[in-house]
Image (cartoon, rainbow, N blue to C red):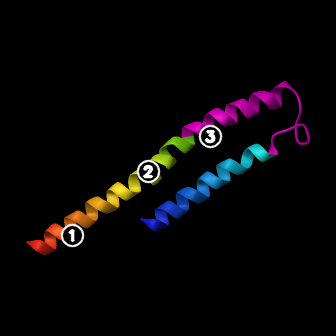
Amino acid sequence: MEAAAVAVRKILDALGSVPQMFGDHTWQGQPADTWAADWNARKAQLSAPLNAVLEEQPHLIARVEEAERRKLAS
């Protein structure tokens, strides 16, 4: 489970690094503004399920641990 969390965090970090490249030092004008707006919308769509993985992970671990406890108690 930790490996999955590490991978998700790396992806989120990579997605977060893209906006640093926005600005008039790399590309200017309406096409650049449109691309940046589209990127931000796509980033939100990509980030939502990745964040859900991180949020759900403790619940999954707890379920597995509970199942193991029940198995040992049987």
Q: x%, y% of residue 30?
A: 83, 25
Label 3 SS:
helix
**Contact, CB < 8 Å: mark 2 with mark 3?**
no
Q: x%, y% of residue 2?
A: 46, 67
Structural crowding at the residue carrying mark 3, measured as other residues with C-alpha within 10 Å and reported as few (<14), some (14–19) or many (≥20): some
Query: Does the magenta portion include 50?
Result: no
**24 left or right, relative to 38:** right
For mark 3, what is the residue? 43
Q: Nearer the viewer, residue 6 or 26?
A: 6
**Contact, CB < 8 Å: mark 1 with mark 3?**
no
Q: x%, y% of residue 32?
A: 82, 32
For mark 1, what is the residue? 68
Among the two numbered marks 1 and 3 on one chain, the one whose residue lies closer to the N terminus: 3
Q: Amino acid at mark 1?
A: Glu
Q: Amino acid at mark 3?
A: Lys
Quadrant assignment for the N terminus: bottom left
Q: Amino acid at mark 2?
A: Glu
For mark 2, what is the residue? 55
Residue lying furthest right: 25
Q: Which dot, 1 or 3, sits closer to the camera? A: 1
- Measured Cα–Cα span from mark 2 to mark 3: 18 Å
Q: x%, y% of residue 62?
A: 30, 61
Rendered position, 26 above or below 73? above
- Measured Cα–Cα span from mark 1 to mark 3: 37 Å
Q: Which dot, 2 or 3, sits closer to the camera? A: 2
Among the two numbered marks 2 and 3 on one chain, the one whose residue lies closer to the N terminus: 3
Q: What secondary structure prevails in the magenta region?
A: helix
Which segment did they paint magenta? 21-45
**25 left or right, relative to 20:** right
